[in-house]
Amino acid sequence: MGIRRVLVTLAVALGTALLVGLGASPASAHAYLASSSPGDGVTLAAAPRTVELRFTEHVVLEATEITVVTGDGRRLAPTGLTLAESDEDQEAPATVVATMPALGVGAYHVAWRTLSSDDLHESAGTFAFGIQSEVQASGPSETNPDLFELASRWAVLAGLGAGLGALVVGRLLGRLPAATGRMPRARLHRLAGRILVVAAGAALVVALVDLVRFGTGAFTTGYVVRWGVREVALLGAAFALGRGSWRSAGAALVGAGLLTVSIGHFGLRGGPTWEVTSTVHLLAALLWAGSVGALALLGLRSAHLGLSHPDVRSVLRGFRLPATVSVVVVAVTGTYLASDVVVSVDAVLLTTYGRVLLAKVALAGLVGAVALLTTRRLHARGVRGAGAGRPLVGVEALGLLAVVALAGVLATGQPAVSPRLVTEQAPSVIDDRPVADLQQTVALRPNRPGASVALVDVLDTRRPSPGPVTGVSVTVRDVASEGAGGGTSRATSEAATPVTPSRWSANLVLPAAGAVDLDVVVHRRGVDDVRSTVHWVVGPSGSDPATVVSRAPVSDLLAWVSVALAVAALLAAVVLLRRRRPFAAPSRGRVRGAGEVDGPAPRDPAPESGRSGSEPPSGRQPDVARGSVTRAGAER
Ligand code: HEM
């Protein structure tokens, strides 16, 4: 590579990285409800003045709708809607605060709909709360993919796949004699260029539709710049392919892939690791799918393109190395990505996202099996000519098309990461405040009727302490029964045991869902006890969907599986390379004798090109007659 090319490539890489980083924040790209106040299924003692919705991403306030539906079906609109975060940071997670009209005793459902300002992804859901009235939680809500967004994603994936496939298969065609390979390669590049232009056009149409649907206020600078540069990269790749400049086309496709990922779930989340892993997954997957698609097309149109069966077979065989590398990379990176988008086995089974992911992995496994079969048939002794692998390449191409289509559904869907689908429950911190000269925090786990644990942290703020803490006791009073029973409340009292010098733990039994008072008494040496009361609402018991298989967190497991797969792949590569070394410079006779490569004799006649398959055409020598390609055959 010349120095100019190196500099141009570096400039493109740096520019893309800067663009991707523009407006970067540690948030995910789609706005989901992280939590709400009141929480889903919570019963309050008094009507809330505001309802808060905390989203994982910045949202467009003008496109946010919140409706409160009463138990008897009346719809109430909030009297005001504000964004708690500064509008200056349009990529940071946002909290929408809805001011409520006067609400009476009863059950309420809050229906919300909003738009992420990062990628214009719409999301919606509901949650429920009660005022002095028990209510069933709505449970995790999932937003279906937006059809416009899905269409645009599919178009871009198709364009990238076509471009990458044309590059790889074009290179393989370049190994054929020039007169044979040039025309199919040019046609393939032209076709891929057209698909890329259509993809850029489809993305533009969807952006215009979004402009009409959501207005200009929905578009952040970061989004517009990333989207715009991706359009340029897609068109640049089409142009470079048309001119046969594969390096520029490759750089443009990598840039477009990176920018596509930046407008997706892993775009700006958690920094470069996710961004790079996701880009590598996308590029490797589309390289595999696009190349298999191009190979299937070559097989179908071979007569038209002047390719004999041995030519097609030689190209197919050359694809073994890129295919193997892509499959391994896709499996490793896909498993790693999954560790961030599904939280448990139940999350996979109970959500649309999880089921689509499962279908995608199963289908990818089947396609992998077909690919293995194709490879065996291609390399089996005595199986030559038309039947050697081609029909299966068509099946493989259709399977991969479906896998990529499912990947698009995933990218525009809602990851299965609801905290309700994983057992790991953070304790509810219900009170954190100074009490006398102490700083006191009270937490409950779980916040459900029945057995629960209260954790009380007591920090002495004065030095020296006027009276060290010697004990803590907690009393739960059932306020609901107090009200109903005319003054006598059911109360359970527990002495807490020390966990650390400043943390105390008490086993409690919480009454039925509803309002309770927790009386906390901190006993101190030499000074009076410090007393405080925390007003709290116990959540309902059956608010979460029943466990189907397991709610144990799987994220760490998946991450480790991906590492294990990567290590296994590296070891296998080392073993294969060591085994292959004796064949690095094989004698032609030995290799041919082993039936490892196509010999000239079995070449099929190629009447359409006006030559016999057994005769080398003019120009470059056929691959089978060249030492370098004979070695490539041995490689495969
Ligand atoms: C072990 C198998 C695989 C696993 C576990 C896996 C997992 C994933 C995950 C979790 C994502 C992220 C989706 C999101 O943004 O929410 C993804 C994206 C993607 N996957 Fe896979 N995948 C696998 C195999 C494949 C295969 C075989 C293909 C196609 C040949 C493929 C194509 C893609 C594409 C194109 C994307 C990017 C979608 C986009 O951002 O628009 N994957 N994959």
Image (cartoon, rainbow, N blue to C red):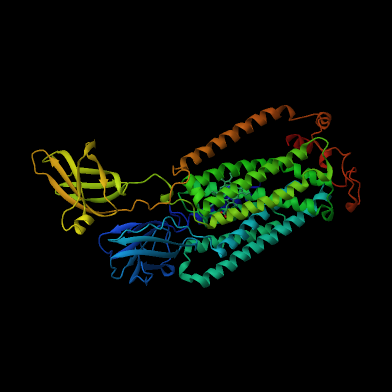
Picture residue at 23% right of the left edge, 43% below the top: 457
x and y percentages locating residue 374 in the rendered image: 74, 42
Query: Could one spot residue 60 in this view of the protein?
Result: yes
In the image shown, does 194 or 60 lie closer to the viewer?
Answer: 60
Q: Quadrant of the C terminus?
A: top right
Q: Going by the image, does 439 lie left or right of 604?
A: left
Say left or right for 482 vs 57: left
Relative to 66, residue 587 above or below: above
Image coordinates for residue 249, horizontal then vertical, percent: 66, 54
Q: Position of residue 343 (x, y in %)?
A: 46, 46
Q: Residue furthest top?
A: 582
Residue at 88%, 52% in the rendered image: 609
- The quarter holding residue 622 reads top right
Q: Nearer the viewer, residue 244 or 406?
A: 406
Quarter of the image for residue 568 reads top right
Can residue 167 be seen in the rendering of this structure? no
* Residue farthest along the front direction in this orientation: 485
Which picture quadrant has residue 242? bottom right
Q: How many badges with numbers are in the image?
A: 0
The one of 333 and 254 positioned closer to us in this rendering: 333
Foreground residue among 453 and 478: 478
Q: Is residue 361 above or below residue 105?
A: above
For image coordinates 57% across by 67% down, the residue present is 206
- x and y percent of residue 574 in the render? 63, 31
